[in-house]
Image (spheres, rainbow, N blue to C red):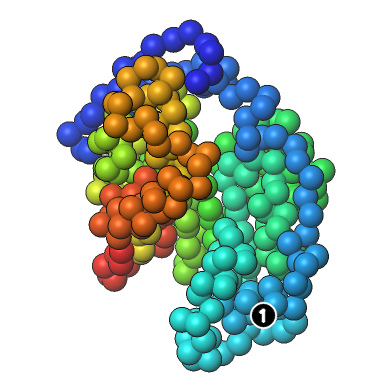
C-alpha cells in the first residue's frame, strides 16, 4: 500500500484483540502517513447550508434537536416526528451528531478540520486535537481551534466537553487506555463519546484475512472486537451505551482489489468490481444483512460514564 519496506507480525490475543507485535515507535509510524493522506489533505470548505437551508435547519431542529433560532423543540414532539424524518435526515445531513448538552464538542484526530467547521456552522462550540502539524494548521486557517499534539498533552479542564468524537482514530493509538482515561476525565457528567473503529470480528475480515482493507498495517496498530473494546472502556470509567454496525462499499471492494493485485483472487470472484454499479447494488443488501447480524466492517460505539443501563445494539 505505501511502497515502503517492512514486514509486521499480527498477534491475536486471548483478550480478543489483534495487534502489531512489536509495536512500532511513533517515528516509524510517521513515515506511513504521506502528505497525500486523505484526512490531512487541505481541501476547500463550503457551508452545508448554502443550498436547501430551510429544509436542513428543519431537520437539524426536529430530528437532531439543534437549538437553531432559539431553544430546541420539545422532546415529545420530536419523538413523534423522528420515525418519519429518519431517512431524509440521514440522506441529507451525513455524519451529523445529535445535539447534546451545551454544545461543547471535541474531535480527537480532527485532520484538516472540515467536519468540525461544519459542526461549528450548525452551532457547536468546537475544539480539535491533531498530531499532524500541517493538518492542524489547515484546520486553524478554516477558523477551527485545534491543539497540535495528543489528547493527553492538551490538558483540557475536567468535564469540559459534552461530546467527544474519535472517527477512525482509536485504532491508530498505541496508548488506548491512557486516551480513554483522559476522555473519561474531560467528559461532562452526562456527556457522550463516539468512537468509530474497524471490527476485527467482521465477516469480511474472516473472508479476506491479511487483504482486508481496514487492516491497514502498520497504521492501524490495534484492532478490537465489540467485546474487547467494551471491556477496555469499562476499565477506564466508560461504558458502551449503544453499538451500531456499518459496512461501507470500500471495505469489500478494496479488499477484492488487494487480492486481485496480489494474484490470489479466486476465479469466481474476478468479475466483481467496485467501479460497476451492478456489483455495488448487489453488495448493498448483503452488507445491510451483515450489519443486522452484528458482523459489519465498522463499529460506532456510543459511550457514557459508567452507569447501570445495559448497552443497546
Element under label 1? helix
Q: Is residue 249 left or right of residue 307?
A: right
Residue 174, horizontal then vertical, whole percent? 43, 30
Can the viewer see residue 168 in this picture? Answer: no
Q: How many marks?
A: 1
Q: Is residue 191 left or right of residue 34?
A: left
Picture quadrant of residue 259: top left
Q: Nearer the viewer, residue 82 or 70?
A: 82
Residue depicted at x 68% and y 24%: 35
Q: Nearer the viewer, residue 38 or 74?
A: 38
Q: Residues within 10 Å of mark 1 (few under 14, many from 20)?
A: some
Farthest top residue in view: 5
Residue 9, horizontal then vertical, whole percent? 31, 17
Can the viewer see residue 113 in this picture? Answer: yes
Farthest left residue in view: 14
- Please name the residue that numbered disc 1 is placed on: 58
Residue depicted at x 29% and y 44%: 202
Residue 157 to residue 108: above or below:
below
Q: Is residue 128 left or right of residue 236?
A: right
Residue 117 to residue 31: above or below:
below
Residue 43 to residue 289: above or below:
above
Picture quadrant of residue 119: bottom right
Residue 38, horizontal then vertical, whole percent? 63, 35
Q: Quadrant of the C terminus?
A: bottom left
Residue 36, horizontal then vertical, whole percent? 67, 27
Amino acid at each position: 500500500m505505501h511502497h515502503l519496506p517492512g514486514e509486521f507480525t499480527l498477534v491475536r490475543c486471548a483478550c480478543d484483540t489483534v495487534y502489531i507485535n512489536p509495536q512500532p515507535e511513533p517515528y516509524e509510524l510517521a513515515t506511513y502517513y504521506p502528505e497525500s493522506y486523505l484526512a490531512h489533505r487541505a481541501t476547500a470548505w463550503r457551508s452545508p447550508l448554502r443550498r436547501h437551508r430551510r429544509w436542513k435547519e428543519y431537520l437539524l431542529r426536529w430530528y437532531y434537536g439543534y437549538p437553531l433560532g432559539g431553544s430546541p423543540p420539545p422532546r415529545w414532539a420530536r419523538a413523534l416526528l423522528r420515525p418519519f424524518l429518519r431517512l431524509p435526515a440521514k440522506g441529507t445531513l451525513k455524519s451529523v451528531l445529535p445535539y447534546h448538552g451545551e454544545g461543547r464538542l471535541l474531535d480527537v484526530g480532527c485532520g484538516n478540520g472540515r467536519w468540525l467547521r461544519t459542526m461549528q456552522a450548525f452551532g457547536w462550540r468546537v475544539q480539535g486535537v491533531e498530531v499532524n502539524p500541517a493538518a492542524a494548521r489547515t484546520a486553524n486557517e478554516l477558523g477551527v481551534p485545534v491543539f497540535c499534539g495528543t489528547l493527553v498533552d492538551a490538558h483540557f479542564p475536567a468535564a469540559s466537553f459534552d461530546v467527544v468524537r474519535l472517527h477512525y482514530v482509536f485504532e491508530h493509538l498505541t496508548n488506548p487506555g491512557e486516551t480513554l482515561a483522559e476522555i473519561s476525565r474531560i467528559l461532562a457528567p452526562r456527556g457522550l463519546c463516539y468512537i468509530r473503529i474497524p471490527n476485527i470480528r467482521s465477516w469480511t475480515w474472516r473472508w479476506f484475512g491479511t487483504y482486508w482493507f481496514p487492516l491497514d498495517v502498520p497504521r492501524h496498530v490495534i484492532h478490537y472486537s465489540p467485546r474487547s473494546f467494551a471491556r477496555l472502556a469499562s476499565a477506564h470509567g466508560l461504558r458502551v451505551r449503544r453499538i451500531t454496525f456499518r459496512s461501507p462499499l470500500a471495505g469489500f471492494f478494496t479488499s477484492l482489489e488487494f487480492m486481485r493485485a496480489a494474484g490470489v483472487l479466486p476465479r469466481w470472484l474476478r468479475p466483481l468490481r467496485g467501479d460497476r454499479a451492478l456489483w455495488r447494488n448487489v453488495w448493498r443488501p448483503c452488507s445491510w444483512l451483515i450489519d443486522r447480524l452484528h458482523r459489519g466492517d465498522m463499529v460506532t460505539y456510543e459511550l457514557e460514564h459508567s452507569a447501570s443501563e445495559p448497552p443497546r445494539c
